[in-house]
Amino acid sequence: MRIDLHTHSTASDGTDTPAELVRNAAAAGLDVVALTDHDSVRGHAEAIAHLPAGLTLVTGAELSCRLDGTGMHMLAYLFDPEEPEFARERELVRDDRVPRARGMVAKLQDLGVPITWEQVARIAGDASLGRPHIAEALVELGVVRDVSAAFTSEWLANDGRAYVDKHELDPFTAVRLVKAAGGVTVFAHPGAAKRGDTVPLTSVAELAAAGLDGIEVDHMDHDESDRARLRAFAAEHDLLVTGSSDYHGSRKTVRLGDYTTHPDVYGEITRRATGAFPVPGAGGRPRA
């Protein structure tokens, strides 16, 4: 089985619609794909409605968190999207996205970049607005060569000149909320230092003790030494190890299925989840 547990659609900052994403996942030879848009479950219904035969969908979200001033992302899988407290927190994060994006546009203008709010809004369309949309505007303007080049300290990284904070969950609260909604939590790309400061492993150990289920190890932002270090850490703290593309469509060079999760780990995620279940496409395989 080929299993990719971290992808994004136009419901947040990807370029594929949810329908296109599941079709492309099937075409890429995946057996299982997770749709994990930022702080949003808006794309799930469309993805399910267009799910091809042979492909199973894992519903999820990537949660914006902050610990001691350092941003981090938490992948949440197979939770009940209607659980009231968790739904309310996701809404608070989403509602802060537009004021935050306006603040970053203003900072860029102060830095002499001829960016406009109208340009960013056009790029985002109906999506949940985020930094990749601003990054794409910088690419359009010729300020940076590609979206990844915008995520540096010069521009939009967590310590960047144009960065603006937003409402983010405490990760311990996120773990608690996801668990209460019957879901499973995985710390996304914990060693992605190129994005800015990373959460120290001592804090990740505390999260593991508080109920964190796993860490994303096989990811484009981790080199071989990062992966070896994180695997050893996961083994020490009894954490599941996942691998994922973090696919954003044409906004990143990574392709669906470039990094995958072992079937045994996927089976354990589905075993632990009680809030929702994987959805097989018509004629697809049953869940592990």
Image (cartoon, grey):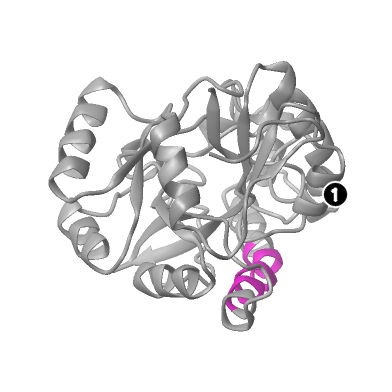
In front of the other: 221 or 178: 178
User: What residue sits 26% from the left and 21% below the top?
Assistant: 224
Q: Position of residue 211 (x, y in %)?
A: 31, 65
* Relative image position of residue 181 (x, y in whole percent): 54, 72
Instruction: Determine crowd level at label 1: few under 14, some 14-19, many 20+ residues with C-alpha closer than 10 A.
Output: few
- According to the picture, the residue beneath numbered tag 1 turns out to be 125
Q: Is residue 95 magenta?
A: yes
| Residue bounds of the magenta highlight | 89-100
User: Magenta span: helix, strand or loop, mainly?
Assistant: helix
Mark 1, secondary structure of its residue = loop
Q: Residue 32 in the image: state x and y as whole percent.
A: 61, 32
Q: Quadrant of residue 242?
A: top left
Closest to the observer, 205 or 254: 205
Q: Determine whether, in the image, residue 164 is placed left or right of residue 46.
A: left
**Residue 179 among magenta residues:** no
Place of residue 79 in the rendered image (x, y in percent of width and height, measured from the top left): 57, 63
